[in-house]
Every structure is written in C-alpha cells, then in structure tokens.
C-alpha cells in the first residue's frame, strides 16, 4: 500500500442518473464553470489515512408504481464490497421517508473534513426540470411510501433531494465524495406532472440512457462496478470498463465526464518485489470458479476422497439420482432437486435440512458456501443453475457458512444471477439441502 497526493474535485457522482454539476458551492452555475479542486492525500486500497464512510440505500417495495427486484440485492452487494474495503457503512433497505432522512443525517454526522465518502442509492428517482438548484436540475430519491408524491411540493416535503445531500457533503468533507446512483429502474411518473423521471444516466459523470428512459433492473451496473473495483484499477479505468459492460450487456450507451485530477484506487496495485530463489517444488493451486478458494480441512479431505479437480475450474456434470434428487458427478454430492418454497431464518434452515428425510437419506445438511456457490452457474440467468436437473427460484438461498467479520450473519447465494452475499441470520431465505 502507498500514499498518493491528489488534486481532486470535491465531489464525483457516478452511477445511473442525469447530469449533475457536482462542484463546490462557490463555483456552481449552469454547468460550464470549472469545479473547485483541493489537494488531498488519499491512500489506494484498503489501508488509508483518511476515514472511509458510505451511505447505501436500496428500495424495492414501492407503494405505487413498479416494484423492483434487484435494488435491494444491489445495495446489499455494495454494502459488502465497501465494508470489505474498510468503509463504515450506513445502510437502509426498503426505507420510507423518515428512515431515509435518519440515514442521511447519520451519514452526514460521520463525515470528517478529510474523508473518502461514497453514496450509493438503488431504486426509483425523479427530477423536476422546471426548477434549478444551485445551477442544477432538482433531483429526488424516492422513498417506498410514495403514494402521496404527485405535485412538486409533495416531492419537496416527502422525497429526498439529491442536490441537498451532495451540497452538504461538499460543505463538510474536503476529501473525496463519490455518489453512485443506480436509478431510475422503471417509470413512476403520473399524469402530466412537471416532474419527470431521471433516466438511468450516470454521473462521474456516467450516462447509460437518456432522460425518461427506463433502465434495466438486472443489476448490471453494480455487478460490473464491483468486479472491476476489485481489480487494481484507477477510478476512471473502473468506469471505462463499466461503460463497456453496460453497453455490451444492455445495449445502453454510457458516457463519462469528470473533473477529477489525480488517482484513486479501491484496490491498490501491488508493489513488485524481488523473486526469491527457492528450491523447485510442486505446488497444488486449486481455483474455484474464477477465484482462489481458501480450503478448510473438511474441503481438503473431500478432494483427497475423490473430488474431481474439474469442479474448481467451474466445470459441471450432473445426473438424475431420483425424482427428488440430483447427483453432482464431480463432487459426489447428492442435492435436493428443488426447495420446499418456505423461507426461513438461518437457524431454521439448518434445522430443516438436518431433519429432512428424503429418498432414504437421513444425513441432509445445509451446504457450505463453497458448495452452494459452485452450484450457481453465472453463464445462465433466471435462474443461474442447470434447469435440466434443478428447479430453484430466482431468490436467495442460505449456506451454512457464517460471515467471519460478523457472527450474526451468514453467506448466501442469489440464484437469479449467481451472486453471493451475506445477510443477517434472522432474515428469511430459502434452503436447498445437500
């Protein structure tokens, strides 16, 4: 890890939103004025001298308009990513206006004069093109209790002003502010109201579609961002890669504009070190899907007992074991063909599998994270699994693996796209026993 001194714009907004002039209050205007810059010292990667804080809100379950599918999973995945990068996260999902205000206040209270701050919002958003706020179009983040949002005055009182959040963050934080807005997924506009929806355009400025155009609810922005931010890439390189992904997979044409000078990494590049001279030896490196797997003793024993190394290269081979079960020909594991459609807490899911009696087997259990993650197939979607053998839902499924940084949470897999994440053990998810 190493320190770089940067001259960097106060705020960078990136994600899916309309153009915002995210400048300091002293230079705000029609958008043609240059942004104010400050010299800040940032550390690339996980180790840094400046505190890191993030505000993450994901809203799926709206009272009016289309209910979203992936806004909350996107928010959860971003929470995990940023926590892994050393951020303190202020988090809310399916939040009403009061909860959103509380979380914004909590986030502002945690900002220092020199912080690395991230704002990520996933859900519906709207804009009022008839009014300008410090030279910008007025933009709103929409709470789930949106039934009463009809007129402009309703939005002022019962929605969250994005412009206000960014202004306050600029005023408090002289370090780096990054706003990622994964909005708007679908139209929630009504009648001839002067308020129009924000197209899924990005600000860093990253634009994916034009104003009023519905964005995909596939989670492509979040997935691409996390995948690329986990590489030792500069922020601008991350967003260039995201632009290409969004265009290839959704047919949208993002563009990027930003005033940042300097370099920021979410994942630090490693410094080259001299290669030591060692005695040649045979080293077994096992790769699970596209990433190294840290194997516990039980996993090593399974490999020694005959697990096919192909499983760690992402290859799969299944056969019908019975009407109710499927055999993995590479691991030798016997899986339930389908779940019982009952969502349970983590403890309840473990108990369900332990007590399951199916096809004369009595040693059912909840799978480990490695076993469940391998079962997911990201070459397939909705669901991300071989449907010739399995019948699973586009939903979250529990693993038996506890999240090492929080014993009250456990890992699970989202079988709509094959993503993994962690969630509180008291929350409800499905179980597929092995």
Image (cartoon, rainbow, N blue to C red):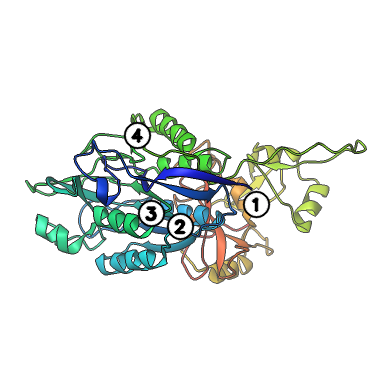
Name the residue nearer the viewer: 366 or 11.
11
Whether residue 65 is visible: yes
Name the residue nearer the viewer: 398 or 255.
255
Whether residue 387 is visible: no
Question: On the image, which quarter does residue 108 sit in?
Answer: bottom left
Image check: 169 left or right of 88? left
Residue in the picture at 24% in, 34% down: 210
Q: Nearer the viewer, mark 4 or mark 3?
A: 4
Residue in the picture at 10% in, 59% down: 153
Against 154, is 102 above or below? below
Image check: 37 left or right of 194? right
Against 81, is 388 above or below? above
Q: CA distance from mark 1 to mark 3?
A: 31 Å
Q: Please provide percent x and percent y for residue 412.
A: 54, 57
**Residue that label 1 marks:** 370
**Residue that label 4 marks:** 257
Q: Secondary structure at mark 4?
A: loop
Of callouts 4 and 3, the N-terminal one: 3
Name the residue nearer the viewer: 375 or 159.
159
Q: Nearer the viewer, mark 4 or mark 2?
A: 2
């Amino acid at each position: 890890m190493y320190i770089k001194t940067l001259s960097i714009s106060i705020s960078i907004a990136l994600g899916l939103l309309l153009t915002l002039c995210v400048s300091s209050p002293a230079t705000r205007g029609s958008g043609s004025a240059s942004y104010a810059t400050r010299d800040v010292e940032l550390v690339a990667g996980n180790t840094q001298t400046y505190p890191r804080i993030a505000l993450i809100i994901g809203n799926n379950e709206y009272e009016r308009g289309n209910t979203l599918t992936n806004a909350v999973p996107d928010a959860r995945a971003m929470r995990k990513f940023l926590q892994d990068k050393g951020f303190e996260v202020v988090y809310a999902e399916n939040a009403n206006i009061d909860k959103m205000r509380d979380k914004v206040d909590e986030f502002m209270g945690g900002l220092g004069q020199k912080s690395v701050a991230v704002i990520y919002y996933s859900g519906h958003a709207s804009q009022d093109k008839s009014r300008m706020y410090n030279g910008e179009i007025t933009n709103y983040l929409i709470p789930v209790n949106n039934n009463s949002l009809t007129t402009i005055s309703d939005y002022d009182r019962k929605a969250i002003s994005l412009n206000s959040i960014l202004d306050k963050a600029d005023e408090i934080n002289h370090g780096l502010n990054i706003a990622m807005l994964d909005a708007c997924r679908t139209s929630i506009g009504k009648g001839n109201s002067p308020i129009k929806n924000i197209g899924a355009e990005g600000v860093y400025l990253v634009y994916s579609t034009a104003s009023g155009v519905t964005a995909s609810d596939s989670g492509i922005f979040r997935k691409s961002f996390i995948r690329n931010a986990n590489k030792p890439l500069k922020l601008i390189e991350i967003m260039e890669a995201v632009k290409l992904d969004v265009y290839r997979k959704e047919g949208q044409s993002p563009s990027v504009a930003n005033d940042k000078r300097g370099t920021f990494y979410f994942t630090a590049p490693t410094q080259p070190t001299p290669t030591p001279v060692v005695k040649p030896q045979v080293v077994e490196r096992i790769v699970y899907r596209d990433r190294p797997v840290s194997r516990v003793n039980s996993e090593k024993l399974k490999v020694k007992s005959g697990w096919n190394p192909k499983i760690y290269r992402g290859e799969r081979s299944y056969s019908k074991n019975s009407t109710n079960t499927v055999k993995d020909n590479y691991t030798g594991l016997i899986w339930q063909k389908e779940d019982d459609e009952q969502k349970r807490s983590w403890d309840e899911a473990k108990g369900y599998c332990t007590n399951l009696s199916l096809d004369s087997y009595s040693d059912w259990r909840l799978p480990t994270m490695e076993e469940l993650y391998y079962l997911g197939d990201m070459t397939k979607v909705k669901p991300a699994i071989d449907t010739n053998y399995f019948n699973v839902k586009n939903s979250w499924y529990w693993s038996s693996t506890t999240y090492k940084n929080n014993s009250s949470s456990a890992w699970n897999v989202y079988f709509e796209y094959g993503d993994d994440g962690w969630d509180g053990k008291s929350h409800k998810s499905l179980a597929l026993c092995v």
